[in-house]
Amino acid sequence: MTGRLDGKVAVITGSTSGIGAATAQRFHEEGAKVVISGRNRGKGAELAAALGANAAFRAADVVKEEDVANLIAFAIDRFGRLDVLFNNAGDSTAGRAIEDIDTAAFHYDMNLLVGGVLFGMKHAMPHMRRQKSGSIINNASIAGHRHGYGPHVYNAAKAAVAHLTRSVALEVAEHNVRVNAISPGLIVTPIFLNAEQRSPANVDRGLTALATQFARSQALPTTGMPVDIANAALYLASDESRFVTAHDLVVDGGMIAGRTMAEQHAWWARMNETFAAT
Ligand SMILES: NC(=O)c1ccc[n+]([C@@H]2O[C@H](COP(=O)([O-])OP(=O)(O)OC[C@H]3O[C@@H](n4cnc5c(N)ncnc54)[C@H](O)[C@@H]3O)[C@@H](O)[C@H]2O)c1
């Protein structure tokens, strides 16, 4: 099926890399006009040029509310409306013991991971309310569901994103604006690699190593790739999900559902050894 986003205009934050870049491409393939956004002007302009006339780049640092407001205004100005906003920009945070958390870093991380999402919703909403339609998608994480998949501040911020999503969804539902989250599992992207400090070849080698490791990390013996999240975002962006709001769509190959059968068997084997020894 093609043309699932025909006639729609989408803004994607943090779309010069990883999940955001894959989503920009996927949305464009399905007929959307796409505004790519991020801090890397060179990369953003290159990606938009590769997609052609139905794509544009606008630089925005999502910790700055003014940048986010200008990004939304740019999309309306360039393409005349706003149907989809994917609040995707994010970064990993330092993994520290609670007594070692740096206060300035904490404020920055919350401003990026929660503030960026909040600013996006705040500035998109007047347009979507007026249009009486719109789909907002916020990128959360399995780290917001279960402990053990990220550092303290990241975990808390992603849980906040999912809850903020539900809270806002119930405010704006009467205007036919839908607000959902996606909680990805392990997805092969530069977020794990401190990419700015590596050469492109080194980033590529790192991504290959991640792909091998991630294939063995969840119930499905499959590596989570950016396009897996892009396809979930596509569903939430399209009218196929018109009756779906306040939802947090976990896309993780079964990672947080519980123990796999192999893990259960290993546990029972240890139990049986214990019984046999008594
Ligand atoms: N990769 C995973 O396994 C995974 C899992 C769960 C959630 N996520 C979430 O997915 C989202 C995308 O991450 P990714 O994995 O594609 O990583 P990525 O590093 O490839 O992409 C993140 C993008 O956000 C941008 N960004 C960071 N700070 C920004 C700021 N202040 N303003 C604007 N842009 C900024 C980066 O430059 C980059 O383009 C993040 O919110 C991340 O927390 C990723």
Image (cartoon, rainbow, N blue to C red):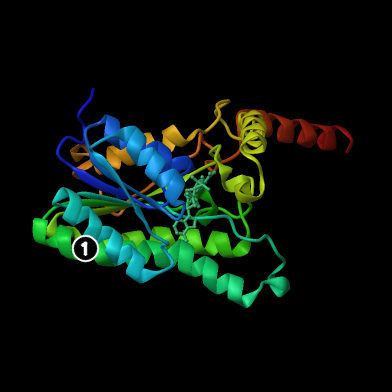
Q: Residue at x 50, y 33 (%)?
A: 225
| Residue at far right of view | 277
| Residue at far bottom of view | 103
**Of residues 173 and 129, which is closer to you in this image?**
129
Circle 1 is placed at which residue position? 125
**Of residues 239 and 130, which is closer to you in this image?**
130
Q: Position of residue 261 (x, y in %)?
A: 61, 29
User: Is residue 177 at all visible to an observer of this figure?
Assistant: no
Q: Residue at x 16, y 61 (%)?
A: 127
Give the structural element (helix, strand or loop) at label 1: helix
Q: Quadrant of residue 175?
A: bottom left
Q: Position of residue 51 (x, y in %)?
A: 32, 34
Q: Quadrant of residue 168?
A: bottom left
User: Is residue 211 at all visible to an observer of this figure?
Assistant: yes
Of the 4 image quadrants, the one containing the C terminus is: top right
Q: Residue at x 51, y 53 (%)?
A: 145
**Of residues 2 and 55, which is closer to you in this image?**
55
Question: Along the horizontal axis of the image, is 115 left or right of 254?
Answer: left
Question: Along the horizontal axis of the image, is 58 left or right of 189?
Answer: left
Of the 4 image quadrants, the one containing the N terminus is: top left
Q: In the picture shown, does residue 69 fall above or below 235?
A: below
Q: Position of residue 4 (x, y in %)?
A: 21, 32
